[in-house]
Image: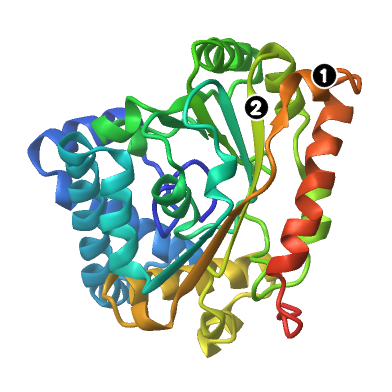
């Protein structure tokens, strides 16, 4: 999943915010269904299709609606049972096994930065489920879709699309960490290869933003926990014949994600999915700050993550 909607197993294309807000009041399921439907069409490169569009939309309507209902229910359950329990409920609708390693490395109190890779799909659900904290707040790009999910929205730090406004969220996150909160950050800012089934996971670490180091410098009493998630991608979807409709690698992966989302939301591949999450040794911010600037700090964290990713890699990883 790309962009900000890391809680969900498919990315979202957002119409103007006023359209979302007005429609949401009258029929939230229909609104989210239509947003999911547009996203699926976009992933297949069919967003501008005119002739035959109605037929294609009918094919995608049921999985789009099912996903919408699951997302709305997930948000409701956060208010009823808390984030970790709600995430667990939804996660285990999609997968059969979650292997958690190193949970003891996550402090149960005090400021914590979970610095995680981002293979997409259910990776954020796995983080919420496995982390022994109820106060985890993700740092995410601002999207109207997520804002209309009240319980998700209230615990998310929004990164503005306007670079001039991003210092605001930096200060908000720093203050939250200083107060003893936990944040989930995916410094790549984009979908990364799943170490279990794809090549390039180690190389992707070079794209991690130095913003991670900036957060560390602004919260000197916090602890950074390198976090790796794998096994979230259903490998057969990467090789599905429909992926050949797109030429570019990233576009083929978007088609694969859409196929997986449809299969996963219906439960068809649940028993074939085994997700792993590993929390590395905690790294005190004070020790990292002594290394130098934000770039040096970020590099130190990625160096700590490399051996974890290596342990999650499958020898027969796809070259797609």
Q: Residues within 10 Å of mark 2 (few under 14, many from 20)?
A: many
Tell which circle, 1 or 2, labels the residue nearer the N-terminal end: 2
Q: Quadrant of residue 315?
A: bottom right
Q: Which residue is mark 2?
A: 223
Q: Residues within 10 Å of mark 1 (few under 14, many from 20)?
A: some
Q: Nearer the viewer, residue 50 or 150?
A: 150
301 horizontally vs 191: left or right: right
Residue at x-position 63% and y-position 12%? 167
Gap in Å between the C-alphas at discs 1 and 2?
11 Å
Residue 133 point in image, percent of width and height: 42, 35
Circle 1 SS class: helix
Q: Does any portion of residue 181 appear in the rendered image?
A: yes
Q: Does any portion of residue 44 appear in the rendered image?
A: no
Q: Which residue is mark 1?
A: 289
Residue at x-position 61% and y-position 67%? 251
Residue 146 disc label:
none
Q: Nearer the viewer, residue 53 or 153?
A: 153
Q: Quadrant of residue 259?
A: bottom left
């Amino acid at each position: 999943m790309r962009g900000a909607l890391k809680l969900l197993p498919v990315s979202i294309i957002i119409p103007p915010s006023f359209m979302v807000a007005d429609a949401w009041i009258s029929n939230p399921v229909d609104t989210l269904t239509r947003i999911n439907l547009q996203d699926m069409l976009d992933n297949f490169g069919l967003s501008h299709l005119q002739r035959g569009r109605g037929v294609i939309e009918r094919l995608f309507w049921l999985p789009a609606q099912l996903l919408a209902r699951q997302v709305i229910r997930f948000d409701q359950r956060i208010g009823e049972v808390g984030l970790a329990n709600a995430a667990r409920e939804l996660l285990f609708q999609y997968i059969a096994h979650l292997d958690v390693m190193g949970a003891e490395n996550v402090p149960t109190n005090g400021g914590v930065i979970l610095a995680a890779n981002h293979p997409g799909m259910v990776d954020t659900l796995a983080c919420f489920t496995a982390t022994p904290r109820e106060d985890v707040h993700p740092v995410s790009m601002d999207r109207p879709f997520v804002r209309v999910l009240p319980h998700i929205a209230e615990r998310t730090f929004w990164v503005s699309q306007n670079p001039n406004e991003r210092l605001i969220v930096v200060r908000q996150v720093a203050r939250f960490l200083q107060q003893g909160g936990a944040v989930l950050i995916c410094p790549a800012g984009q979908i990364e290869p799943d170490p279990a089934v794809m090549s390039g996971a180690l190389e992707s670490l070079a794209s991690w933003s130095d913003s991670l180091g900036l957060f560390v410098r602004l919260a000197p009493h916090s602890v950074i926990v390198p976090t790796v998630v794998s096994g979230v991608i259903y490998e057969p979807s990467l090789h599905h014949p429909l992926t050949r409709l797109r030429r570019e690698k990233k576009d083929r992966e978007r088609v694969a994600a859409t196929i997986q989302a449809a299969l996963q939301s219906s439960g068809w591949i649940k028993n074939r999915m085994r997700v792993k999450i590993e929390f590395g040794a905690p790294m005190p911010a004070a020790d990292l700050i002594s290394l130098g600037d934000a770039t040096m700090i970020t590099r130190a964290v990625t160096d700590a993550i490399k051996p974890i990713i290596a342990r999650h890699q499958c020898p027969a990883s796809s070259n797609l």
